[in-house]
Amino acid sequence: MASQAHCAYCFEILSSSLEKRAPLDLRQVEQLWKQYTADPNATEIDPAEDPTELDENAAPPSVASPASPASPASNDPNYRPAAISRLLAPSPSSASSSSVQSTISTPSGASEASSATSKNSSTSSVFSSLGKKLRGAEKESSGEESPLFVTWNTVHRSGETRLRGCIGTFEAQELNDGLRSYALTSAFDDTRFNPISLRELPTLEVGVTLLTNFEPISDSLDWIIGTHGLRISFIYHNRRYGSTYLPDVAKEQGWTKEETMVSLMRKAGWSGRSSEWKTVDLNVVRYQGRQVKLGYDEWKEWREWVGELE
């Protein structure tokens, strides 16, 4: 299933391309997003890293529900979630020679250790040294694949959203590479629109859909609005056509199933009469996938928080 971390990664890829800087990779974004959205009052204890012995008879710690990053604890400029502190701390064997840095700021405790390094170092070099735990998580998470679509929308002041670009693939992609590729392709290469520019970035929201449960159907109306996306192909006047709608399209547009099919055929390039759509021999595949969205302001707030970790 798609996640907001996937969306944050798409924003990271697009903004870094427009700003001509090096981006974080997906695993780094996932780890940092997890820490950002974690309960700031919860202490994560890793026995492999914490030398303190636990009393076997002690009551287990309570589990707190997730809290907003804007909680009082997070307003303390010196506060860092426990897990982030461990990610940023150099290992004993390299404490004298390594430091964590980024393009925005440096914590006071690390300023001397990083004095020989420019504050303008790329973000990728910053987070490549986040420590063994982050690198280990990258190895554990690598290899996840899925067909996917990336959608960019423009959000107007009225709250109205309009499509700005949407391109994807039905071939399974490794997510780090696939999301990176289609975040840019949908932003720059959707021929229905001009390429997205840097000045537009604050007006955008991104949606990520990971596709599952592909099922060929013999009845073109054997699908559920809001649940299934559709992929069609057909031959008309000796020419092959094809198109797709994601699961959310018909519901958002308020279409019936027949209206959706006619629109989908029109999208493919079919020019016949609407009343004759059923006479066309259609190959229809239904599929599922829940779109997850993230707005620019939410991404920007997270990105500024990441900058404070250097």
Image (tube, grey):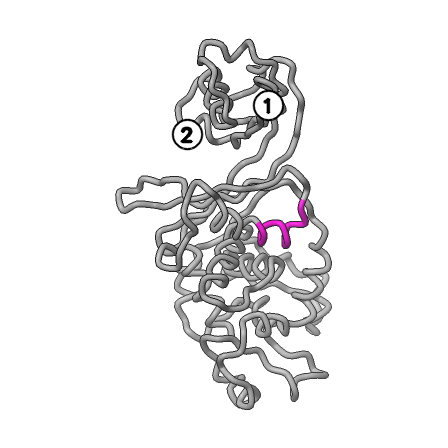
Q: Is residue 186 above or below residue 288?
A: below
Answer with left or right where residue 157 lies relative to residue 183: left
- Residue at coordinates 55% horizontally, 47% vertically from top-left? 3
- Residue at coordinates 57% horizontally, 74% vertically from top-left? 126
**Hey, which quadrant is residue 52 in on the image?**
bottom right
In the rendered structure, does residue 145 fall within the stretch colored magenta?
no
**Hey, which quadrant is residue 100 in on the image?**
bottom right
**Label 2: which secondary element:** helix
- Residue at coordinates 64% horizontally, 40% vertically from top-left? 147
Answer with left or right where residue 297 lies relative to residue 307: left
Q: Can residue 157 be seen in the rendering of this structure? A: yes
**Residues shaded magenta:** 173-181
- Residue 43 in the image: state x and y as whole percent: 57, 64
- Residue 206 in the image: state x and y as whole percent: 46, 47
Alpha carbons under labels 2 and 1: distance apart: 30 Å
Name which residue type carries label 1.
Arg
Mark earlier in primary sequence (2, 1) = 1
- Please, which residue is most extreme toward the left here? 158
- Residue 203 in the image: state x and y as whole percent: 35, 51
Q: Which mark is residue 252?
A: 2
- The residue labelled by disc 1 is 239
Q: Quadrant of the N terminus?
A: top right
Q: Label 2: how many residues lie within 10 Å, few (<14), some (14-19) or many (20+)?
A: few
**Hey, which quadrant is residue 298 in on the image?**
bottom left
